[in-house]
Image (cartoon, rainbow, N blue to C red):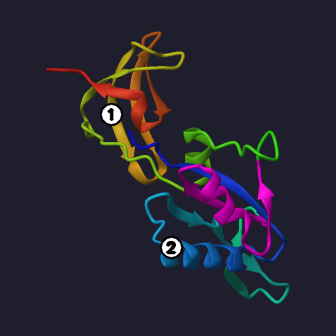
Amino acid sequence: MAEAAKWYVVHTYSGYENTVKATIEKTVESRQLQDVIQAISIPMETVTEITESGVSKTYDRKVYPGYVLVKMVYSDDTWHVVRGVRGVTGFVGTSSNEPTPLTDDEVYAMGVEKKEIIVNYEVGDTVRILDGPLSSFTGVVESIEVDKNSVSVIVSMFGRETPVEFELDQIEVVSQ
């Protein structure tokens, strides 16, 4: 069975992130390593700045300057390919020889990969809450915002109808 690729954090010299990414991509292409080094990412965010004169300026900036994320199947070969790139100072991990892969939660929190959540309920459906302090309560879906991973559910508590926000995967439709 082939080992699954995981995300690793590579430390680079400041300002070398784009060069490191381009060099790794070129090496992967020339050596046909697409199956073991699958993706290289520099997390970016869009920032809008308003200058003293009131002009707004929008630009992209690195979320983690000095770091590049690499999705790869870890082996001596892949370690040497990445570590041998000019500008790379090493992998982030517990020891210098063994880099520590990011957990799935860390990857999603960084926005490197998105979880695909299939929403099988809609506004007006009766749903059951799956976790949290209100687990096993039922309510009615008031609104769904898939892009914000949010759903508002009207829950009856203490004789009152109360809107409560949940993540999309925290509720399920009650079978009719």
| Lateral position of residue 89 relative to residue 38, left or right | right
Kindly tell me whether residue 137 is visible in this rendering. yes
Per the rendering, the mark at residue 31 is 2
- What is the magenta range? 65-92
Q: Which mark is residue 55?
A: none
Q: Could you tell me which quadrant the N terminus lies in?
A: top left
Disc 2 residue type? Arg
Which percent across, then down, holds residue 143?
Answer: 36, 42
Q: Disc 1 residue type?
A: Val
Mark 2 nearby-residue class (10 Å; few <14, some 14–19, many ≥20) = few
Residue 121 x %, y %: 25, 36
**Residue 129 in picture, x, y percent from top left:** 40, 21
Residue located at (77% from left, 86% from top): 54
Q: Quadrant of the C terminus?
A: top left
Q: Please, is residue 159 above or below residue 141 in the view?
A: above
Q: Nearer the viewer, residue 117 or 147?
A: 117
Tell me, yes or no, whether the highlighted magenta stretch contains residue 98: no
Does residue 78 show up magenta in the picture? yes
User: Is mark 2 in CB contact (under 8 Å) with mark 1?
Assistant: no
